[in-house]
Amino acid sequence: MKMFAALSAVLLAPLFGAPAFATDEPAGSAVVARYNFDGGANAGKISDLSGRGGQLTIRGANNGQVAIMTQGTSRFASFPGACAATAAATCAKALLEAPDDADLDPGTRNFRWAATVRLTTAQISGNANVMQKGVATTESQWKMQIGKTGRAQCVMVARGSRQSFVARSAHPISDGNWHRVVCERVGTTLGVSVDGEAGPKTTIPSTLSVENAMPLRIGGPNLAGNGDMYHGQIDDVYAQLG
């Protein structure tokens, strides 16, 4: 499902206006995971559309579920609401998870990850993790999250040094509308775009490598505690290598 008609060619269109980012899809690049939820969930599984990624499995705690919702002819994933801090032990939580896959470990190569998101300020409890592979304190990580102020954030944590780099959108996006967020690492630059508009960029080392044995997770880092869970809606997720 494409929440924005103008984004229907997002895999082919340039994501950033700056010359440092290619205007055409790089030679040899490949979409390695893609999910749009139009097929719904079958026995708790959501199919990958790229032909290279694994199925997403719905995982929950305390009766938490990821609901596949319909709006017009479109479908998207909706995550459980936020809970009070005092209710962390009993809070309903849920996320989507695909198995560890070498195609999702870019190493030092160019890499792009994207999702269409909708949430309000009231749905943000701490940081809201949209999608990630890896955790900041172990091995390495790439991640998209919505920060406490509602700004989209693209994060990379280097293998070995565990040094963290963040590119943040210029404006908050927690306004209850759908927004397309794209994170992209190109050489020594980490950038973020929202609805096709390039945001601030962060310089990263050319040697920054992301490679880990963690699964791909959408909607939260894990089901422990109540931290960094995403409480809005998500659609049109993909990861692209090269």
Image (cartoon, helix red, strand yellow):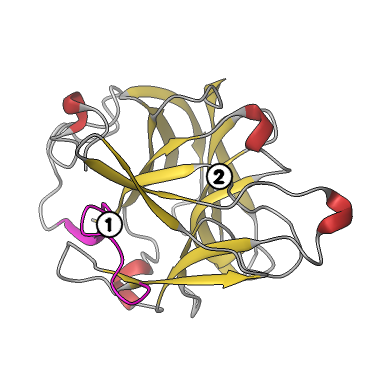
Q: Residue at x 73, y 60 (%)?
A: 91
- 34 part of magenta stretch: yes
Q: Is residue 83 above or below residue 53?
A: above
Q: Is residue 30 above or below residue 112?
A: below
Packing grade of label 2 (10 A; few <14, some 14-19, many >=20) is many
Q: Position of residue 163 (x, y in %)?
A: 65, 56
88 sits to left or right of 64: right
Q: Position of residue 115 (x, y in %)?
A: 37, 44
71 sits to left or right of 162: left
Q: CA distance from mark 2 to mark 1?
A: 18 Å
What quarter of the picture does the C terminus occupy? bottom left
Element at label 1: strand
Residue 170 can be seen in this image: yes
- Highlighted magenta segment, given as a residue range: 29-44
Element at label 2: strand
Q: Residue at x 39, y 61 (%)?
A: 108
Q: Nearer the viewer, residue 181 or 26?
A: 181
Q: Nearer the viewer, residue 165 or 169?
A: 169
Residue that label 2 marks: 145
Q: Residue at x 58, y 46 (%)?
A: 231
Q: Position of residue 1 (x, y in %)?
A: 21, 43
